[in-house]
Image (tube, helix red, strand yellow):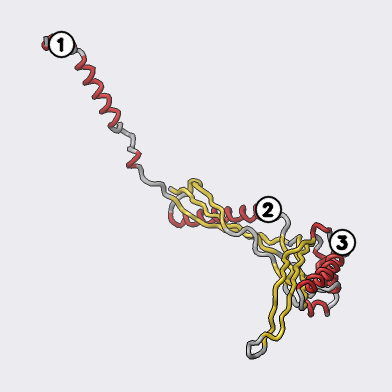
């Protein structure tokens, strides 16, 4: 009986042998074809390029403040509120829209005065109200400062110049950065005796806009000078790109 069953399936032996041969041929590399594991790594050149664009600012942010002090907190707050309202009205009188006048910081805090021996000789409360003004016409900056100081502002924290829409200048700086990186890559490739084939990746980094130019002055000095001279100058928009070039 066992001999009979073995003879019934003798015809399967050639099929099994053929299947094994096909598996072996599929696993073996064919002539002229390189095994992916044996392929040489890509040759690359990594370059960082920079772009800079000089632009004139079209916005200014004026920061002034009102500082008051009294023996009672309520008195200091009331005095500060009275002067602050007068300062805001004076700024609005220079053609500044209400939405462009806002409170930057408001704080109430106790103060102590001590003698040489460290003994408290006076306790009081101080109120500080910072007012931030967005100026869309730069030729008004000096007049706005004058008006605020005349109305009672006794702190000047500075004038900062910037851009309302820096995207256009940023795009120009990025284009310059890419061109700079490509010039460097071509020069280095020529010196090394290789050829730039293409770009594998581009990475953009760095601060897009330089910090706003800020002017700070003492309120007393500015109040003594009618028509505060302010020169906005120019701003620098920068961009940095890192490009990986494929070379051969």
* Residue 167's disc number: 2
Label 2: how many Cα within 10 Å (few below 14, some 14–19, many 20+): few
Query: Can residue 115 be seen by looking at this rendering?
Result: yes
Of the residues tagged 3 and 2, which is closer to the observer?
3
Of the residues tagged 2 and 1, which is closer to the observer?
1
| Quarter of the rendering containing residue 119 | bottom right
Residue 113 image point, x, y percent: 69, 83
Label 3: how many Cα within 10 Å (few below 14, some 14–19, many 20+): few
Residue located at (69% from left, 81% from top): 112
Please, what secondary structure does the residue beneath circle 2 have?
helix
Estimate the spatial distance between the alpha carbons at disc 2 and disc 1, rounded to whole Å. 84 Å
Q: Earlier in the sequence, mark 3 or mark 2?
A: 3
Query: Can residue 155 be seen by looking at this rendering?
Result: no
Residue 4 image point, x, y percent: 13, 9
Q: Is residue 199 above or below residue 163?
A: above
Estimate the spatial distance between the alpha carbons at disc 1 and disc 3, rounded to whole Å. 108 Å
């Amino acid at each position: 009986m066992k001999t009979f069953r073995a003879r019934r399936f003798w015809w399967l032996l050639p099929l099994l042998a053929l299947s094994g041969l096909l598996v072996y041929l599929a696993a073996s590399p064919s002539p002229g074809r390189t095994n992916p594991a044996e392929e040489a790594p890509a040759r690359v050149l990594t370059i960082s390029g920079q772009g800079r664009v000089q632009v004139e600012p079209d916005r200014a942010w004026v920061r002034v403040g009102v500082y008051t002090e009294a023996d009672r907190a309520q008195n200091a707050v009331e005095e500060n509120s009275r002067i602050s309202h007068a300062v805001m009205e004076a700024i609005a009188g220079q053609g500044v829209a209400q939405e462009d006048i806002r409170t930057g910081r408001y704080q109430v805090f106790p103060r102590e005065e001590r003698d040489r021996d460290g003994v408290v000789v006076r306790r009081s409360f101080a109120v500080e109200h910072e007012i931030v003004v967005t100026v869309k016409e730069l030729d008004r900056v000096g007049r706005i400062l004058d008006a605020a100081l005349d109305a009672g502002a006794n702190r000047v924290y500075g004038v900062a110049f910037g851009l309302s829409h820096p995207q256009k200048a940023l795009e120009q700086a990025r284009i310059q950065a890419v061109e700079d990186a490509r010039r460097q890559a071509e020069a280095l490739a020529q010196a090394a005796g290789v050829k730039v084939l293409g770009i594998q990746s581009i990475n953009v980094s760095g601060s897009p806009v330089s910090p706003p130019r800020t002017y700070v002055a003492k309120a007393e000095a500015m109040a003594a000078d009618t028509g505060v001279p302010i020169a906005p100058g120019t701003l620098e928009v920068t961009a940095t790109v890192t490009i990986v070039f494929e070379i051969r």
